[in-house]
């Protein structure tokens, strides 16, 4: 086995399978041996397209602008590696360790990152279009302007992930956990965030408890059974969204637009929904008890045994409504169309 003088011990042995000459700490080295210890290796700009590197130890390696398209990195350890500007289109990264990697502008489109660990990774501007991230962990990751269009994220974890203007449009995220994530201005258009079951959909809706979704766009999204408790949805667009069985209790959704959405069986106890828009929405068996509905617009909304008990109805806008379709016991500032003027 070839040994190379003057090279850091951790990368002393040249590695196989990669099959070309690269620079490791300033020296040329033929990456053709069978071992996979490349800790701290300098592979900036390397062409590793389609290479077999499963289980490789690439901790803190420099892989800036490297071509890793279609590479096999299953179980590889890239903790702390610099992948800035690299391309990993279609790469296999299942169960890989990608903790704290630098991957600004990195391309992961159509890559398989199932069960991969990207905790605290810098993924600003990274492209995960149509990537598979089932059960992947992105806790506390930085994902500003990252693209997850059409990505597959069932059961993924993005707890306390942070990023503005992230694009999750048309992504599949049933069962994902976004608790306390900050996703201001995120795009969830036509995303599948909720569960798919018939009737009562069960527990597979995504978790967005305490998430900041200010000005997020969820137009046409499936949000069935999603847990939004204590989330911030101020100014969010949920037009034509499916929110059946979703839980918005204690959330803040001032000025949010729920026009033409299905809110059947939704739970929004004590939610802040003042100035929210519900034009043409369906509120069958929706539970808005104790909600702040001041100035909310329910024009052309369809009520059916909708619970407005103990809510604040000051200044709400209503179209034609059958009083028998709503429960208003102990509600405040009840409008005249509901027999109001009784309570304050």
Image (spheres, rainbow, N blue to C red):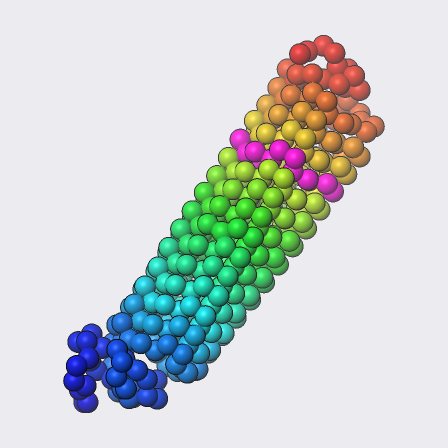
| Nearer-the-camera pick, 132 or 58 | 58
Chief secondary structure of the magenta span? Answer: loop
Residue 304 in the figure: left or right of residue 139 = right
| Nearer-the-camera pick, 161 or 242 | 161
Say which quadrant the C terminus sits in. top right
Measured from the top left, where is residue 151 in percent x and y? 54, 62
Say which quadrant the N terminus sits in. bottom left
Q: Is residue 289 visible?
A: no
* Residue in the picture at 40% in, 79% down: 45
Would you place residue 199 above or below residue 49 in this image? above
- Does the stretch in magenta take in 253? yes
- Does the stretch in magenta take in 338? no
* Residue in the picture at 44% in, 50% down: 161
* Residue in the picture at 71% in, 46% down: 240
| Nearer-the-camera pick, 62 or 212 | 62
| Nearer-the-camera pick, 29 or 297 | 29
Measured from the top left, where is residue 195 in percent x and y? 57, 50
What segment carries the magenta color?
Answer: 248-260
Would you place residue 113 above or below residue 10 in this image? above
Q: Is residue 272 visible?
A: yes
Quadrant of res 17? bottom left
Quadrant of res 79? bottom left
Farthest residue to the right: give it: 320
Measured from the top left, where is residue 249 in percent x and y? 55, 32
Measured from the top left, where is residue 208 in percent x and y? 51, 44
């Amino acid at each position: 086995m070839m040994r190379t003088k003057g090279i850091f011990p951790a990368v002393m042995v040249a590695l196989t399978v990669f099959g070309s000459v690269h620079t490791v700490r300033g020296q040329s080295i033929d990456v053709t041996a069978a071992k996979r210890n490349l800790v701290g290796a300098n592979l900036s700009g390397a062409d590793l397209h389609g290479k077999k590197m499963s289980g490789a130890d690439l901790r803190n390696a420099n892989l800036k602008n490297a071509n890793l398209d279609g590479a096999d990195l299953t179980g590889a350890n890239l903790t702390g590696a610099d992948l800035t500007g690299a391309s990993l289109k279609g790469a296999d990264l299942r169960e890989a360790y990608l903790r704290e990697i630098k991957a600004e502008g990195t391309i992961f489109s159509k890559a398989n990152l199932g069960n991969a660990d990207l905790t605290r990774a810098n993924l600003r501007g990274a492209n995960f279009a149509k990537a598979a991230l089932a059960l992947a962990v992105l806790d506390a990751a930085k994902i500003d302007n990252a693209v997850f269009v059409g990505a597959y994220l069932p059961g993924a974890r993005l707890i306390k992930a942070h990023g503005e203007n992230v694009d999750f449009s048309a992504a599949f995220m049933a069962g994902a956990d976004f608790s306390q994530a900050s996703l201001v201005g995120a795009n969830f258009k036509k995303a599948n965030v909720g569960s798919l079951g018939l009737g009562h959909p069960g527990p597979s809706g995504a978790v967005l408890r305490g998430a900041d979704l200010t000005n997020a766009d969820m137009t046409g999204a499936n949000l069935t059974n999603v847990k939004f408790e204590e989330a911030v949805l101020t100014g969010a667009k949920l037009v034509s969204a499916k929110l059946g069985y979703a839980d918005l209790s204690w959330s803040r959704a001032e000025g949010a637009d729920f026009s033409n959405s299905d809110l059947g069986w939704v739970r929004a106890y004590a939610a802040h929904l003042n100035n929210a828009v519900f034009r043409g929405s369906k509120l069958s068996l929706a539970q808005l008890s104790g909600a702040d509905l001041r100035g909310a617009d329910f024009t052309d909304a369809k009520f059916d045994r909708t619970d407005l008990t103990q809510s604040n109805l000051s200044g709400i806008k209503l179209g034609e409504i059958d009083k028998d379709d709503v429960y208003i016991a102990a509600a405040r500032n009840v409008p005249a169309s509901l027999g109001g003027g009784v309570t304050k």
